[in-house]
Amino acid sequence: MEPVRPAADPRADLRARWQAQDAGARYAVRRFRDPRAALRDPMLVERILDRHALRPSLKPVLDVPCGTGRLRAVLERRGMRWVGADVSPSMLAEAAASPEAALVLADAERLPFADDSFDVVVCCRLLHHLQEEELLEAVVAELVRVSARHVIASFWDSASWHAWRRRVGLRRPEGPRGRRAVSKRVLSRVFEECGAEVVDFHHSFRFVSQQTFVVARKRAAVPVRAVATRRARARLFDLDLPRAPESLGPAGS
């Protein structure tokens, strides 16, 4: 009889993906070698900043995970002070190639910053890697905690064409370690529980592009432990707890 192996820790697995010494260089050169692909996220973030009239303030903007610093130019061009945080030393080493980069080695699930430290928090290309809803809640809670006003985060929309094809078997799923689409309803509820109100969704090509951005306005910080306890209680007693009504912007659905 084979010994029972402990279940893999999704948090450790996620962190380990970007720990290779050459991960930053590979990400910078291969992942966004197409100029159009490289500009897509920065252009969407800039449109969101314009649409919601987010201007420079006394507090900086946090970019987490910042990767190789792709969003820095967009934010600094607008007069915002950029701070990049990432769990990967390799990514930070690549980002540090730019002069005077403010960089912090940090895990998005446990950010080493005080509450309300940043005017805006931008989180690009992380949430679709979070397989467990518990981990999604923990990360969102941290993003909201350190933000004083807004959180802008990208995710994979479960209403997109690619996600639908996976559900009906027309596209091969990525497996338990792959990326995960989430519904706007679930994401709105998670932000609500963490103390922020979703005010808008932005798409590069609605229902076709998987990558979608959510914009949330902070109301009040909610401790991560309180969110986890509430969810555990709901699962334990199989309760359908009442949710606050969704509040979506004109692009929401």
Image (spheres, rainbow, N blue to C red):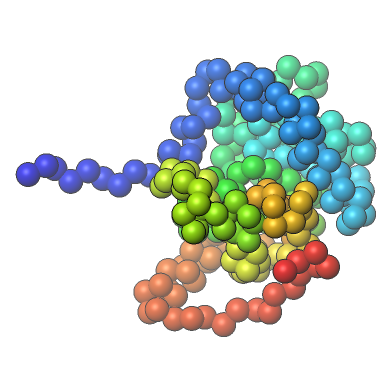
Q: Residue at x 46, y 48 (%)?
A: 173
Q: Which residue extends farthest left?
A: 1
Q: Quadrant of residue 51?
A: bottom right
- In the foreground, 34 or 60: 34
- Counting the numbered discs, the total is 0
Q: Quadrant of residue 62?
A: top right
**Quadrant that contains the C terminus:** bottom right
- In the foreground, 178 or 73: 178
- In the foreground, 237 or 224: 237
Tell me: residue 229, above or below residue 206.
Answer: below
Is 28 on the left or on the right of 80, as rendered? left
> Residue 109: percent from the left, percent from the top?
55, 47
Q: Residue at x 56, y 23 (%)?
A: 23
> Residue 39: percent from the left, percent from the top?
80, 34
Tell me: residue 59, above or below residue 93.
Answer: below
Q: Residue at x 43, y 43 (%)?
A: 177
> Residue 232: percent from the left, percent from the top?
42, 69
Is 105 on the left or on the right of 5, as rendered? right
Is 71 on the left or on the right of 140, as rendered? right
> Residue 184: percent from the left, percent from the top?
65, 64
- In the foreground, 178 or 62: 178
Q: Residue at x 26, y 45 (%)?
A: 6
Q: Is residue 225 visible?
A: yes
Tell me: residue 181, above or below residue 237.
Answer: above
**Quadrant that contains the N terminus:** top left
Q: Is residue 154 visible?
A: no
